[in-house]
Image (tube, rainbow, N blue to C red):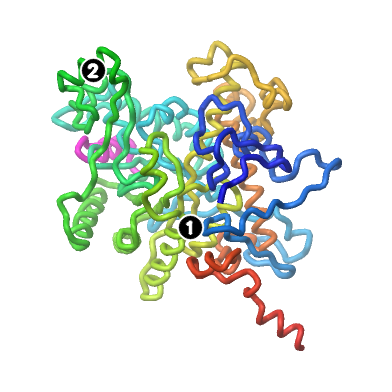
């Protein structure tokens, strides 16, 4: 199935091939528009509706019935009833309106983490694009109130970080990331810091707990959906490559070899790839993995961490079962399950295209395994689903597919796009700040000027943000964070509408009964009821009464 590259009803266009998420397969920071997420970062909930209201009619393209994917799951709706109304509301038609749907929720065991909307970022780690746009990512997350993840290797690749006895003693880039979020944190959302092999060796966990205490959630890293190896970046500086090699990373090609240095000197080699190590390579059984994992969790708890999470990738069923079982036994606060189909800043392309379990299949199995444990009396870890998810319907479907165990939807590229877009606009409107905000445009393109030429008219969410932070503080809010707020507002309103249609007015009321399979293959793979089979028995009782 090839996905359409444009949606005339919304006025959106994908520059290249369209991914399952609706994003372009290659998302550039300097993009001038205009996929659905890009436009939503400017105009917010207006993108829930067809364009040119009042002069057009529009009909569904019905492209969701082929193959097994999130797009082959459809959302049910009901014509009576209301469940989960927030306190103080009645079942009257005046109270049962979509703005009254509550999207607030929480995850965790002993120390709960609250959020205002059920999304979180993917891991924004050592890739340079994460560092460039961090202020927009972090401030946007803090203002909206959703968790943001500092990915692996941030300390290790920081040339300004300092080591003492093989452990980190100074980490300015990591400090910047944590403190940027905490500056606007108001009790909703969270800052999560990942640990991989190198981070563990470098003493990142010890550094973070000593400096920030329980303000930070620490996350163990098993893998991700985009690739089957550790994280990587590319560097174009020989001295930097040698620094990374000295820091203990795998650098390819090896910058210490004379022939490689000669090739770089003559420009036959222009870049070096820095790779992280695979974990658990010395272990050969699930029992050994369990012990190693439990020992790691126990060590983190002894350090003082009150909240611990785990991120796992698109591995097969054994690894999935291990992640759910061990995370539940260890009473972790969150397990993020990342299926293939998502994206990353730098993964081997054909690996990203061909490895791992597709998201919808992996997430369905996660529900099956979690439910199996729950029926045996186990308190199942709270889960987040990730992997190629970008729209409000994805949020509803993923939470429903994993209900009641799934609390959040983890989005990677979708929550990065507003930072790119806002920074490009800010760089034009504030030329003196262009380098600081990493703006890529010399002038505003027509895709932006069609909405206006000042931030107050370009961003639908501008005055919402101003109301939250105050008029004087707006000068310190990056446009990328305003765009993040605007996109989050659109996603939130879209989820509220879908939930109201399903007569569910609180997140905890969403269930697998609210979705169904659009084709028989999806029915077989997911265990969801086929569209025309759902409630068919009840329909016939009405007819025969």
- Give yes or no for contact between labels 2 and 1 (Cβ–Cβ under 8 Å): no
At a point 45% along the width and 59% down the height, the residue shown is 363
Left or right, 517 with reference to 259: right
The residue singled out by tag 1 in the image is 360
Q: Please, is residue 510 above or below residue 258 in the view?
A: below
Q: Secondary structure at mark 1?
A: helix
| Residue 460 location (% of width, % of height) | 69, 33
Q: x, y percentage for residue 243?
A: 22, 22
At 60% across and 53% down in the image, what residue appears? 393
Q: Which residues make up the magenta segment? A: 200-215
What main secondary structure does the magenta stretch of the protein show? helix
Answer whether residue 209 is magenta in the image: yes
Q: Earlier in the sequence, mark 2 or mark 1?
A: 2
| CA neighbours of label 2 inside 10 A, class few (<14), some (14 to 19), many (20+) | few
In front: 441, or 482?
441
Q: Residue furthest right?
A: 55
In the picture of the structure, the residue carrying the numbered disc 2 is: 263
Asked whether the viewer can see residue 486, the reply is: no
| Vertical placement of residue 116 versus 135, above or below | below
**Dot 2: element:** helix
Residue found at the very far top of the displayed protein: 432
Residue 39 on image: x %, y %:
65, 35
Front tag of 2 and 1: 2
Image side of residue 297 versus residue 309, left or right: left
Quadrant of image for the C terminus: bottom right
- Give neighbour class at mark 1: few <14, some 14-19, many 20+ (Cα, 10 Å): many
Q: Nearer the viewer, residue 12 or 541?
A: 12
């Amino acid at each position: 199935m090839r996905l359409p590259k444009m949606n005339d009803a919304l006025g959106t266009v994908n520059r290249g091939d369209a991914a399952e998420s609706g994003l372009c397969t290659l998302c550039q920071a300097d993009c001038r528009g205009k996929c659905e997420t890009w436009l939503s970062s400017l105009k917010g909930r207006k993108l829930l509706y067809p364009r040119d209201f009042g002069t057009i009619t529009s009909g569904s393209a019905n492209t969701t019935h082929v193959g097994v994917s999130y797009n082959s799951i459809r959302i049910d709706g009901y014509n009576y009833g209301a469940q989960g109304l927030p306190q103080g509301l009645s079942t009257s038609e005046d109270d049962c309106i979509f703005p009254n749907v509550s999207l607030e929720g929480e995850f965790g065991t002993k120390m709960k983490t609250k959020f205002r909307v059920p999304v979180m970022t993917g891991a924004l780690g050592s890739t340079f694009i994460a560092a460039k746009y961090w202020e927009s990512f972090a401030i946007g997350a803090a203002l909206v109130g959703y968790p943001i993840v500092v990915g692996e290797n941030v300390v290790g690749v920081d040339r300004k970080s300092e080591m003492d006895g093989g452990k980190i003693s100074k980490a300015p880039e990591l400090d910047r990331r944590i403190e940027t979020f905490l500056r606007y944190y108001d009790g909703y959302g969270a800052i999560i810091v990942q640990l991989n092999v190198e981070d563990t060796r470098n003493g990142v966990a010890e550094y973070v707990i000593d400096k920030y205490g329980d303000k930070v959630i620490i996350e163990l890293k098993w893998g991700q959906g985009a690739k089957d190896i550790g994280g990587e970046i590319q560097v174009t500086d020989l001295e930097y490559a040698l620094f990374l090699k000295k820091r203990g990373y795998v650098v390819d090609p090896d910058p210490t070899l004379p022939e490689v240095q000669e090739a770089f000197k003559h420009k036959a080699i222009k870049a070096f790839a820095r790779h992280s190590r695979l974990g658990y390579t010395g272990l050969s059984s699930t029992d050994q993995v369990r012990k190693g994992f439990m020992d790691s969790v126990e060590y983190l708890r002894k350090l003082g961490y009150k909240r611990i999470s785990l991120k796992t990738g698109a591995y097969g069923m054994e690894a999935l079962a291990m992640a759910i079982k061990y995370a539940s036994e260890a009473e972790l606060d969150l397990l993020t399950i990342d299926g293939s189909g998502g994206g990353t800043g730098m993964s081997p392309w054909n690996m990203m295209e061909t490895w791992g379990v597709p998201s919808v299949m992996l997430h369905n199995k996660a529900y099956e395994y979690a439910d199996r444990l729950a029926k045996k009396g186990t308190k199942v870890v709270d889960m987040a689903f990730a992997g190629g998810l970008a729209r409000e319907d994805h949020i509803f479907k993923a939470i429903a597919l994993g209900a009641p165990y799934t609390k959040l939807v983890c989005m990677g590229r979708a929550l990065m796009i507003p930072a790119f877009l806002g920074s490009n606009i800010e760089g034009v409107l504030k030329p003196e700040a262009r380098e600081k905000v990493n703006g890529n445009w010399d002038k505003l393109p027509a895709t932006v000027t069609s909405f206006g030429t000042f931030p107050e008219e370009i961003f639908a969410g501008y005055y919402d943000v101003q109301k939250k932070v105050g008029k004087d503080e707006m000068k310190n809010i990056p446009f990328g964070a305003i765009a993040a707020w605007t996109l989050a507002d659109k996603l939130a309103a879209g989820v509220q509408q879908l939930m109201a249609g399903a007569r569910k007015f609180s997140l905890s009321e969403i269930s697998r009964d609210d979705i169904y399979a659009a084709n028989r293959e999806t029915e077989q793979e997911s265990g969801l009821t086929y569209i025309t089979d759902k409630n068919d028995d009840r329909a016939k009782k009405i007819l025969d009464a």
